[in-house]
Image (cartoon, helix red, strand yellow):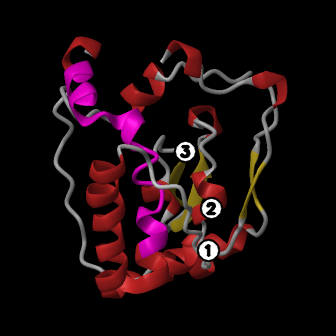
């Protein structure tokens, strides 16, 4: 599998280009689409070609990331294609490749501050965004006795802290797990 993906990553220059793209979202959020888009073109295409080095400034986003979530009624439903096993993979396979390990008997390191907020606010307004933004499928909506509720599969957690950043009401408390568990990034 690495044999297949490595040429794509090499061609994209993903690690080298990450400094070039650091302001992408902040430019769009702070300056709007027309001006932010033009700044992105300048930073990513013009600056790097002229000066052969990354941009020396950083644009910070003044708004929290979760404040940009839209109400579910105003957003079209997305139908994602099935993973092809070459360039796109299913979440359980990707979690397995990360080497994520947690002790089975430790307490959950992801806590909901208000359990009812998910059913009272997040599901009606956003169709519970955590089930979409989590790259490891930690959050899942299940039905118990005819009522929807959020199930946390903490053993899948990659410790990316997306839930801490993206949750619309800052309802998820992320704490480091006991025993140093988590993904084995050195083996990736």
Tell me how far mark 3 sits from mark 2, CA to CA. 15 Å
Q: Quadrant of the N terminus?
A: top left
Residue 97 image offset from top left, x and y in percent: 44, 20
| Contact flag, marks 3 and 2 (Cβ < 8 Å) | no
From this view, report whether residue 35 is shown above or below residue 5. below
| SS at circle 3 | loop
Task: Write down the region rendered in magenta.
Answer: 5-27
Tell me how far mark 1 sits from mark 3, CA to CA. 22 Å
Is residue 127 visible in the rendered image? The answer is no
Q: Examine the residues drawn in magenta and state their main secondary structure.
A: helix
Task: Classify residue 166 by image quadrant.
Answer: bottom right
| Contact flag, marks 2 and 1 (Cβ < 8 Å) | yes
43 displayed left or right of 184: left
10 displayed left or right of 104: left
From this view, report whether residue 129 is shown above or below residue 163. below
Asked if the stretch drawn in magenta spans residue 13, the answer is yes
Mark 3 or mark 2: name the one nearer the start of the chain: 3
From this view, report whether residue 172 is shown above or below residue 30. above
Residue tagged 2: 165
Residue drawn at the location 28% of the way across and 33% of the way down: 89
Mark 2 or mark 1: name the one nearer the start of the chain: 1
Residue 184 image offset from top left, x and y in percent: 59, 19
Label 1: how many Cα within 10 Å (few below 14, some 14–19, many 20+): few
Residue drawn at the location 79% of the way across and 65% of the way down: 113
Mark 1 or mark 3: name the one nearer the start of the chain: 1
Q: Tell me the mark number nearer the camera, choosing from 1 and 3.
A: 1
Residue tagged 3: 138
């Amino acid at each position: 599998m690495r044999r297949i993906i490595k040429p794509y990553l090499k061609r994209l220059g993903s690690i080298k280009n990450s400094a070039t793209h650091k302001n992408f979202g902040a430019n769009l959020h702070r300056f709007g689409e027309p001006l932010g888009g033009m700044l992105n073109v300048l930073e990513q295409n013009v600056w790097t070609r002229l000066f052969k080095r990354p941009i020396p400034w950083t644009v910070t986003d003044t708004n929290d990331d979760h404040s940009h979530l839209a109400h579910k009624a105003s957003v079209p439903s997305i139908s994602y294609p099935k993973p092809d096993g070459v360039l796109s993979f299913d979440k359980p396979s990707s979690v397995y490749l990360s080497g994520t390990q947690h002790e089975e008997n430790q307490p959950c390191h992801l806590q909901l501050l208000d359990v009812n907020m998910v059913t009272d606010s997040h599901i009606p307004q956003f169709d519970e965004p955590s089930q979409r933004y989590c790259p490891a499928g930690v959050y899942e909506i299940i039905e118990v006795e005819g009522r929807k509720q959020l199930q946390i599969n903490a053993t899948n957690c990659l410790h990316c802290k997306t839930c801490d950043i993206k949750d619309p009401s800052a309802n998820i408390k992320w704490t480091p797990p006991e025993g140093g568990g988590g993904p084995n990034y050195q083996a990736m």
